[in-house]
Every structure is written in C-alpha cells, then in structure tokens.
Image (cartoon, helix red, strand yellow):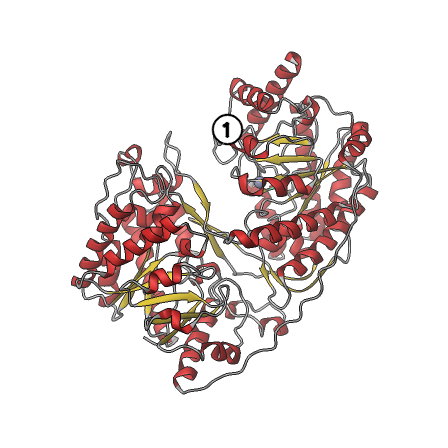
Amino acid sequence: MKSTILGYPRIGPNRELKQALEAYWNARIDRTELDRVGARLRSRTWQRLAELGLEALPAAFSEYDHVLDAAVMLDAVPERYRAAVDPYFAMARGEDGLPPLRMTKWFDTNYHYIVPEIGPDTKFRLVSEKPLREVREARALGHRVRPVLVGPVTLLLLAEGIAPLERLDDAVEVYAELLAALRAEGVEWVQLDEPALVADRTPAELEAARRAYDRLSGTADRPRILVAGYFGALGDAMPVLAATGIEAIAVDLIRGGPIDPGAMRGKTLVAGVVSGRDVWRTDLDDALHRLQPYENVVVSTSCSLLHVPYDLERETDLDPALRARLAFAEQKVAEVVELADRLARGERGAPAPLPTAPAATSRDERRSPYPVRAAAQARLGLPALPVTTIGSFPQTGDLRAARAALTAGRMRQQEYDDRIAAEIEHVIRVQERLGLDVLVHGEPERNDMVQYFAEHLDGFATTRHGWVQSYGSRCTRPPILHGNVRRSAPITVQWATYAQSLTDKPVKGMLTGPVTIVAWSFVRRDLPLRAVVEQVADAVSGEVRDLADAGIGIIQVDEPALRELMPLRRDEQQEYLDWAVQAYRTATAGAGDATQIHTHLCYSDASDVAGAIDGLDADVTTIESARSGGRVLAALGDFERGLGPGVYDIHSPRVPGVDEVAERLAGVLRALPGLPADRVWVNPDCGLKTRTYEEVEPALANLVAAATRLRVRL
Ligand code: MET
Ligand SMILES: [Zn+2]
C-alpha cells in the first residue's frame, strides 16, 4: 500500500443513513431495508475512494457507533438488553422502560460514542459477522478492503463496570479468533484503532497493551496488523507497540508532531499528514517535506475523516477565496493520493514558514470580589431556591418550518420576526404561569447555540451541506472560523430587551462562551487556538456590555464545551485551563457588579475541571447533575457562589414527580451545608430545546412545587 485513509464519513452525503435510521425507529422501514441503505453507502464510498485513486480502502462503516459495534462483536451485551426487540439500538437509544447505555465524547472530538458496560462476569465470545460480511460484500464489488475495528485496549479502557483492563486478556482472545477468521477470508490487513494510547497511560496499562499486541501478532494465522494511534503523539506507547510483532503503526503527524524515524523499528509508518480534524487544504509541499525522514511510508490522514463533511464541491455559496483554502473528505482523499504519487516520484517538498504567534495578551479586567457583587445583586430580589431554566424552550416543528421557509426565501423577514416575537411572548407567559423566578426568552431565533453567533460575527462562514456526525443519526454543521473574529453590531440585544419588556420578572440574556464557540467550529490553523479564543472573547465581551447597558440584569454565558477542548495529556491541561478561564473572564468582565453572570456546563464529570469552573468566577453556575447524583457536588467541593445542579434530566422524555425533585433538592442542600439557600438554584440539567411542551410544562411545574415545599421547610 502507498496511500490510505483511516476512515470515512458514514452518515451519507445527503444524510441517507440518518433518514433510514429514523424511518427504522419509527417502523416505517424494516431491518432489511435499513441494512440495504448501509450497503449502498458502503458501496458508494468504496467506489468513490477507488475512483479518487486511493490504494488501500478501509471498511469502517457503522450503523450507529463503532465502539458499540466492537462491544457487540464481543457479545458484551448487558443482560437487560438481551430480550429487547433490537438489542443493538436498545443499547444505543433505549427502548420502552429500558434506558440506553451512557454516551460520551470520543476523546477531544464532538463525536459521541456509547460507553460499553463490561462486568467481571461478562462472557466474551465472537458473535458478530460484521467485519467478515463487509469484506465479502466489498469483494463482490471488486474491492479488497481493510476492516477497521476499535482495538481491545481502547475498548476496555473506555468501558464501565470493571477495573479498566481487568478483562483485557479475555477480550484479546476473541480478537485473535476474529483475526483468524479474517485471514481465512483472505484479508490482508486489519486496522485496530487505539487512540486511548495517545493519552497518559500508567506503566501497568502500557504493559497490558504490550501483552495484547504480543498475543495478537504472535500467531501466523492472521492478517497483517495496523495499529492506529491518533489525536496526538503515541509517546511512551510508541516503543511498546514497536517492540511487538505488528506490521504497521499509524501516527498522527499533525497533532502529535514528528517522530524519531528509528522508533518505527522497521515497521511500516502510516503517516497521518493530511488532517482529519479540520477543513483546511493541506500544504502539500510542506507535507512532503515532513515525510522525508521516514522509510517505508504509507501516506494517510491523521485520523478517520469521520469528523469532516463529505464534499466541498457542493458548497457553491462560499466565497471563492475561502473555498480555495478548504478541503472536505473527498478533497482530502485526493490530497493523500497526490502526496503518495509525488513521494513515489522522489519529490522532496519544502517546509512552510511557521505561523508567527502573536504574544498572548495579558488582561486584568476584573470584576469586584464576589461578596461585593453579591451585595450589589441583592437588587434582583430573588427568593431562596430561585427556579430557572438553562435557556432554550422546545423548538417546535412549526418554528423549524418557519426558519426553513425563511432560508428558502418562501417567508419574508418581517413575517419570520413576528413569528419569533410571538414565540418569545408565549415562552414568557408559560414561565409566568408556572411561577419561575428567573425567566428566559427561549432562544427560538437560534438554530444552534454556536451557529447563530457564527452567522452574526465577522470571520465565520457557514456551510449548506457540511454535516458531521455527532452521534447516531444526529449531525451538526460546524461553522468555519476562517478570519479575524469581530462583532460589527449587537446580536442578541433586540430579542433580549423585547423579552424583558414583556414581564416584571428578570429575563436572562443568553450568550455562548468563547471556548464553546471555538470548540464547535472548524478553526483556522494560522493562529494558536488561544489567540482565536481571545478574539472571540472580545466579541462576546462587547455583547455582554451592550446587554448590561440595555438594562438586562442577568446574563448567562454558556461554556458547555470547556472540558472538550482540554488536551489529552495531563501536562498540557493546566495551561489550557488557565487561558480558557481567562478568556471567559475577559468575556464577562464588562458586566458591572450589579449584573449577575450565570454560566452553564453540561457534563456531570466535573472532577478534572472543578478548579476551572471555580476560576470562571460566575455568580451562578448551573451544571448537569440529575443522573449522576452527588458526584458533581462532591467534585466541586466548597462552593461560595450560586450553584444550580440540574434536578431534571432533560435527556429523557420522563417527567420527574414533585417528590422526586424535592428529594434531589434536599440532597443538594445537604451536600452544600455552607451555601445560603438563596445561592442554591433550581433548574434542569440543560436546555429544553429537544423536548416537547407536553413534557416540559408539567416538569417545570414540579420544579416550582418542589422549591416551594423546601422553602417552607427552610
Ligand atoms: C449544550 S448547553 C445548552 C445551553 C443553551 N442555553 C440551551 O439552553 O439550549
Ligand atoms: Zn447544556
């Protein structure tokens, strides 16, 4: 092989898989038809990759998630799912009365995987024919493909229910069995993805990895093995892998930097020089130059192309100057092929000049210490246990239809604005009727909390078809941050002041924080991330000032992605957290002491960012907590400022009862004995935009009732 990629988007250029999945879940098509759609997508992908001239084709399809596929392949299906109508999708999404497995982010991407549940007694056996089926399917179409699977070390490290690698040896036996079966099928290469090896690993974990790959490579009865370690440098795992009998290692030369050529010990280097994590064209001369030190090289992408959209050709509305700088999945494959050709011709390339990093600006805009602010904010006159929501209210079909009509030119702006105004009024009246204390306008004007700001700031572009899988059938269209970010006019002030004009209760102004805006966009590479985040922070800061000047007394600046951008290696994390926190403080510094700043984070696993959450210095922090009980509170420790651990799990259609909410609240109060009750907030885990009014109204009524009950007791 000379050229390959580590994986390709699976959702379909027109999101065919999404439509088929949703049709299957709604019983509009059957399993056979769903599988047929999958087969068509695989066939189209292989054909396209071959047409583009790629030599070694991966078979990296999944109907929902590749981690779930690997777990199912080992028969790691918890007992409670076995009787489900469709155990695979029951694990992924739940079935009547049967909640799904947990879902969480795949390393530092915005792709979410299903967390396998593996116990001490889980009996592993090879049950899935998936890789074999796909190999046969490809052969019938005239392609030889390389099955791509999550490797055993990563699978076990990501699983829940056991000490991480306790069951590794058992799992490896099943992988060995699969490799033998693939060999019998005539498969030449298999790819085992081990991104967990680019994070810090203990000596015991590295030793376990060595054992696993010694075992897998130790038999003759197998295809050649490519182990892929992407999203960073393999570091200490490199010599471990290199000492085993595997034939090739895929290295992320973009995010991991160059490696010592000697470290490969004669193995094939699958050199990731075309980025799979962004949408920028590769400087081919520079990439060629970086390939020079190595022998025995296969040109590749840095990771799977799963994280980028399909095809730039379809983005006909983009500014041509910007378009010339971009590459989506198809274009990146073409780059890989061209690089492999030029390398084979002996071309040497030339290094690109290093981007000059602007000096980090140190800012010391600060608000007064919290006690001073808290005194100034007493003017808000809030009760003990104030009840609020996180921002969005249900996005009804009608609302979405109006937005689609506006975009398609079928609705005039004025008509659309009237529609939004009516929606805001509705949302305000609902909250007043239910008795909430701090209201929101409901965010009906926003398709997405990042895209909306990207559409209103200079320096961003948005795409029409640039869909990227987030999880299962869910896709997002990340904006492209390509230039200097500036705010040329207020963005949210008009709707915020309109909402406030409708009621005497305080209405929160709603903004997305700088880290989250950057985390959920494709970001320019010619500036350090830190500098980009600082630019966005300045833009947000202008908006905060304008909202405060317009008389908005409470402003929420959401940072749900604070943890997502955190480097995988521990020794780089603190530096990141320092500047991320600084950016947040820059963004919110313009609010006077009397303006209450809220922030919102939505993950319950706060332990490694607890210090940073405290550092944001928001007056009120709302955070996901309903499913995880006291874990968040334990991680946050003594908290002096306002805190609203979620007491309503919005990820489920279930309406929590008053007793249940009251019990959770009582638990919160017990866990925070030092916090005065007017600093304990009552709120859902996250925004309500994916729920319906039938669920949300009774649930919020129960939040209010529970808060009222506890206030009496206080
Ligand atoms: C993913 S966090 C979402 C926060 C946002 N304000 C909302 O309620 O939708
Ligand atoms: Zn949230």
Query: Ligand 2, what quadrant?
Result: top right
Instruction: Report helix, strand or loop for mark 1.
Output: loop
Around disc 1, counting alpha carbons within 10 Å, would you say few (fewer than 14), some (14 to 19), or many (20 or more)?
A: some
**Residue 287 horizontal side relative to residue 192, left or right:** right
> Which residue appears at 38% of the width and 47% of the height?
157
> Is residue 432 visible from the viewing direction of this image?
yes
Amino acid type assigned to the residue bearing label 1 in the image: Gly
Residue 142 image position (x, y, % from top left): 25, 71
Q: In this rendered view, identify the residue nearer to me: 197 or 46.
A: 197
**Residue 420 horizontal side relative to residue 545, left or right:** left
**Residue 406 horizontal side relative to residue 66, left or right:** right
Residue 701: quarter of image = top right
Residue 446 image position (x, y, % from top left): 63, 47
In the picture shown, does residue 301 fall above or below 629? below
Identify the image quadrant of the N terminus. Answer: bottom left
Which residue is the site of mark 1? 629
Identify the image quadrant of the C terminus. Answer: top right
